[in-house]
Image: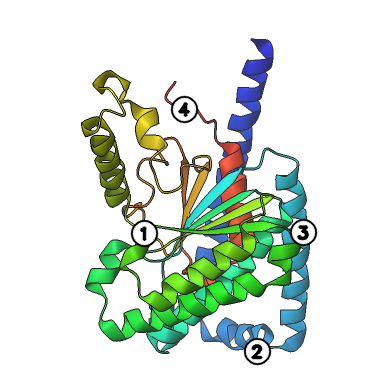
Amino acid sequence: MKKLVVLNCEIALACNVAKGRSRIGSGIDRFAKWLLKYRVIAIPANIISNSKMAWSIVSRIDRVRVRRQRERISKGILPKHISIIMDGNRRFAWNKSVGKNIGHQKGKEKLKQVMDWILDLEIPYLTVYALSTENMSSRDNDELDSLYDLYVTGLTEISEDPRIHSKKVKVRAVGRIESLPERVRNAIILAENRTSEYSNFVFTVCLAYGGREEIVDAVKNIATDFESGKIRLDEIDTNQISKRLYDSDIPDPDLVIRTSGEERVSNFLLWQIAYAELYFSEVHWPSFSKSDLYDAIENYQFRRRRFGE
């Protein structure tokens, strides 16, 4: 009991320290913005901030900070399964005054980076939300065609990526795959077949996916089995639904990350994230950094998971 009390106190202290740092950092930011209103300070500040030496120093400090952050989270309990709602490609493009296609392209490149960071941490499961059933009905045909082309390119690249094969990453796509164009389905088959024998890591991409639709499909499957006499009424429980989900072979997510400042799950893994920890990042997906990932994991490590207790 004493050990439990001490552990709770340590966790509470760590959370308070983190919150304190956040408040101090926010205060410094506000003070700096206030100072920059005055021309006598703003002019030299802009000169310094645009100098190569200043950026070199900042970059070096940032690399050191990220390296120490990695060492810190590696000493804690890492999540086994991280799921990411990759939001903000279009808003990133609008902010940069470039086309939506550029935003989606940058998002694809970011996913490859994040996968590398996840593999480096040896987190065995990564699931990403790439295309929802709602996206398929709300986006215009030109944007959808562009997205489909990106998926074909991305899945083909993954199937040929030396690191995917050296790390033995199994690639899977889940959702109502039959509703996707043939070229996307063929790219999925290619990536899945070339990695089907691997089991060290599992990368799952949700395409034409909806959490409610997944549950409906599972219930229909149960109803069919009940009608044919394969299952009795008293045998229908949560386990029967869980094992009929698209991703029934992998554990439920421990940590769900959503980028771009939105604080909702948007029909993503509704059944599986019942006890997942949720983390919302302000940055748009193409701008998501290694430090942002480490922040999410460190935040996860500060929490006490209760699982309904």
In this view of the protein, which residue sits in the foreground, 112 or 243? Answer: 243
Residue at x 40% of width, y 29% of height: 239
Q: Residue type at mark 4?
A: Phe
Q: Which residue was labeled with disc 1?
A: 262
Image marks 3 and 4: residues in contact by CB distance under 8 Å: no
Residue at x 39% of width, y 48% of height: 269
The answer to whether 211 appears left or right of 298 in the picture is left
> Mark 4: which secondary structure?
loop
Distance from the alpha carbon under mark 3 to that under mark 4: 32 Å
Q: Within 10 Å of the Cα at label 3, are there few (<14), some (14-19), or many (20+) other Cα atoms?
A: few
The answer to whether 143 appears left or right of 290 in the picture is left
Depth check, mark 3 against mark 4: the one in front is: 4
Q: Earlier in the sequence, mark 4 or mark 1?
A: 1
The answer to whether residue 37 is seen in the rendering is no
> Mark 2: which secondary structure?
helix
Residue 130: where, in percent of width, then height?
Answer: 43, 65
The answer to whether residue 238 is seen in the rendering is yes
The answer to whether 173 appears left or right of 161 in the picture is left
Depth check, mark 2 against mark 1: the one in front is: 1
Q: Which residue was labeled with disc 2?
A: 47
> Mark 1: which secondary structure?
loop
Where is the C terminus found, in terms of image quarters?
top left
Q: Earlier in the sequence, mark 2 or mark 1?
A: 2
